[in-house]
Image (tube, rainbow, N blue to C red):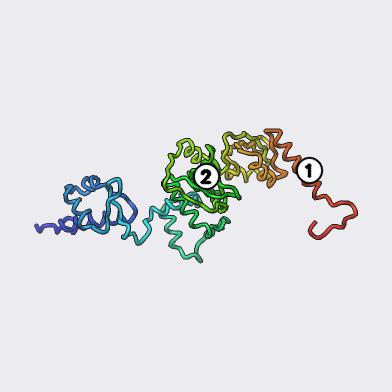
Amino acid sequence: MPATPRTASDTKGGKFTQRLSSIIARLHQGETIDKHQLVAEFGANIRTIERDLHQRLQGIAERNAQGQWQLALKARSTIPAKHLHNYARMAGTEHLFPNSSLPYLLEQLDTPEQRRATHVQPVPHEDLDGSTHTFTALQTAIEQHHPCRFTYKGKARHAQPYRLIHKNGVWYLAAEEAARLKNFSVALIEQLEVDTAARFTPQRSHLDYIAAKDDVWFTDKTTEVLLRVAPEVAHYFARRPLLPQQQHRQDSDGSLLVTTHINHIHQLLPVVRYWLPHVRIVQPVAWQEELVRGLREVLVQWETPRGTRSTALD
């Protein structure tokens, strides 16, 4: 009986080729590799794996600070596929599509634009082209814990930077000044100086506070607010949060009772005014009274005095 021919993968050379091909593919996908895991996976001894990484893949693989192996910087001619997910998470678009799987995303990118069934309207963003140096310097100061001096709205500031936060198309700097956590619009920061000779230790309480916030209003305490939203616009409040820490439940008449935690009344009023007359502040009562008082003052200003001819802009 003739012997069954061995396939390429059964030979020593075939196993060697498969092993190196698998390692290279994983490196190009952005994976970090532990040599001991490779020993267990391929059934090779540690010296063989070390020769693969140190000699055969020299210039392709390099060790990182944790002692694992990754794709060498000079070999990164393409972006690893898994970085697409990381970028989407960083840019806040991770849940933009109902299907967030990598195969779906790659399929969309591979489809010519004129044939795509989807179109995403861009969100307006401020233009920071003239603040590139400031933005980069703040990033470095945050990473290396250097305090900063700058001018903000004509006033000299001395602050410890914690995070750069993007909210509604605007970049803000979260920083501690005079023992208080504050936010500053990056576009309004002028004459930035980073004190590279000094370092500060970030407070864990500040980092946790920033991470838990879904807005850029920084105050020591918040006010719990209760709103009643009419059935006509309830869907808009239910489909996505329009207010910080928003929670809601539907009432028997189809309206929504919405609770939110607000740092300052001026954080809430623009939202309520936008949805008038379908939204009412139930608690605190004083805030509803402030809303009504402001509306009355505006109506008085808009009233046309008797005997004055209206214009096309009235």
Residue 113, placed above or below residue 175: below
Which element is circle 2 on? strand
Indicate the quadrant containing the C terminus: top left, top right, bottom left or bottom right. bottom right
Q: Residue at x 66, y 42 (%)?
A: 266
Q: Residues within 10 Å of mark 2 (few under 14, many from 20)?
A: some
Give the alpha-carbon distance from disc 2 to disc 1, as whole Å: 41 Å
Q: Quadrant of residue 5?
A: bottom left
- Counting from the top left corner in percent of width and height, residue 24 is at 27, 56
Extreme right residue here? 307
Indicate the quadrant containing the N terminus: top left, top right, bottom left or bottom right. bottom left
Q: Which numbered disc covers residue 158?
A: 2
Q: In this rendering, does residue 270 appear at all? A: yes
Q: Nearer the viewer, residue 269 or 159?
A: 159
What is the three-letter code of the residue carrying label 2? His
Q: Which numbered disc covers residue 84?
A: none
Which residue is denoted by mark 1 in the rendering? 296
Q: In this rendering, does residue 99 appear at all? A: no
What is the three-letter code of the residue carrying label 1? Arg
N-terminal of the pair, mark 2 or mark 1, is 2
Which element is circle 1 on? helix
Residue 299, placed above or below residue 133: above
- Counting from the top left corner in percent of width and height, residue 213 is at 53, 40
Q: Nearer the viewer, residue 112 or 310?
A: 310
Q: Residue at x 87, y 58 (%)?
A: 309
- Counting from the top left corner in percent of width and height, residue 263 is at 60, 38
Q: Is residue 195 left or right of residue 240?
A: left
- Counting from the top left corner in percent of width and height, residue 43 is at 19, 47
Q: Is residue 16 left or right of residue 207?
A: left
Q: Nearer the viewer, mark 2 or mark 1?
A: 2
Q: Nearer the viewer, residue 57 or 105?
A: 57
Q: Residues within 10 Å of mark 1 (few under 14, many from 20)?
A: few
Extreme left residue here? 1
